[in-house]
Amino acid sequence: MADAVGNKAVKDFHLDVPAPDQGFFVKGLGNTDWGLKNRLSRIFSPKSGRTVMLAFDHGYFMGSTAGLERIDVSIAPLADHADVLMGTRGAIRSCIPPTADRAICLRATHDNSVLFDDLSQGSGFALDMEDAIRMNASALAIQCFIGAKGERDSLEALCRAVDQGNRYGIPIMGVTAVGKEMARTTKYFLLATRILAEQGASIIKTYFCEDFEKVVAACPVPIVIAGGKKLPEDEALTMAYQAVQSGACGVDMGRNIFQSEYPIEMCEAVRKVVHEGFNDKEAFEFFQEATKAGK
Ligand code: 5RP
């Protein structure tokens, strides 16, 4: 193993050099199979190259949380407004109509529940690939706890999911968890995103941070940002805008959409930023107009 101590500090991200064009519109994934590319094309719009994923997987460790008490009531009506629905197989099967013509990203790990002080102790692969295929999944999400007790188990789950995903042409989204032991610094996200990509994840979900363009540059596959705790709508749109400006290929946002008083309008405003080149101010104006019109 390479010596990790006393190495020359990382500094050149070649921000002016674009990632190599591999003849496919999704970064770093030109050398994959047709089926995997076809699924990626359901996740990322071939027109904008980006995606709006709607995350409602929180119940897998929190149970019902604000806005997710009734997924059939709060999330099902949002389905048409997102590109991808990200949830557990239990929530999707029971609460989302199979007629929803949206890509599915299945949360495929189980972790400690909120009853434990530390959520980051371990993680396991939560489903069989056959069931993911039965659910017509376009991707699976595997959460990894880099720098915490659960690092080894969660990386093991990621590697097994990548093996099975490659066998069946299903991309794996590696999710960089945040928790007690993991600092939300640029240095941390640079490390965690890169480790997950090196282990074969095709998409990385992470949190927006300072110098995000460096995190994007050093990650050979597309990055989408998590929303995190609910912010005022204008601030959430600014975060999405800055992430996209820094090279993110979209968002996988939950609470900042479904906890909004106007979730459909918020989802549409996020789409304006991600797909239509609106800046944050324009998107917030759109949101305000849309909420007025809806009243
Ligand atoms: C944690 C997760 C979440 O369960 C969820 O998807 C996060 O969504 P948001 O922070 O936007 O509510 O992936 O790592």
Image (tube, rainbow, N blue to C red):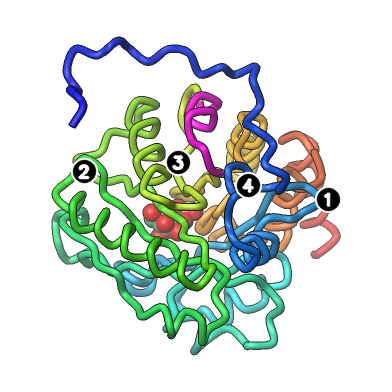
Callout in the foreground (3, 1) = 3
Residue 180 is labelled as 2
Measure the C-alpha gap from mark 4 to mark 3: 12 Å
- Determine the residue positioned at 42% across, 12% down: 11
Q: Position of residue 185 (x, y in %)?
A: 35, 28
In the image, taking residue 138 as reference, residue 154 lies left or right, namely: left
Q: Which quadrant would residue 156 be assigned to in this image? A: bottom left
| Range of residues picked out in magenta | 212-221
Nearer to me, 95 or 2: 2
Q: Amino acid at mark 2?
A: Lys
**Label 1 or label 2, whichever comes before in sequence order:** 2
For label 2, the SS is loop
**Label 2 or label 3, whichever comes before in sequence order:** 2
Q: Position of residue 6 (x, y in %)?
A: 19, 12
Residue 289 is labelled as 1
Q: Position of residue 108 (x, y in %)?
A: 38, 70
Mark 1 vs 4: CB contact within 8 A: no
The residue that label 3 is drawn on is 207
**Label 4 or label 3, whichever comes before in sequence order:** 3
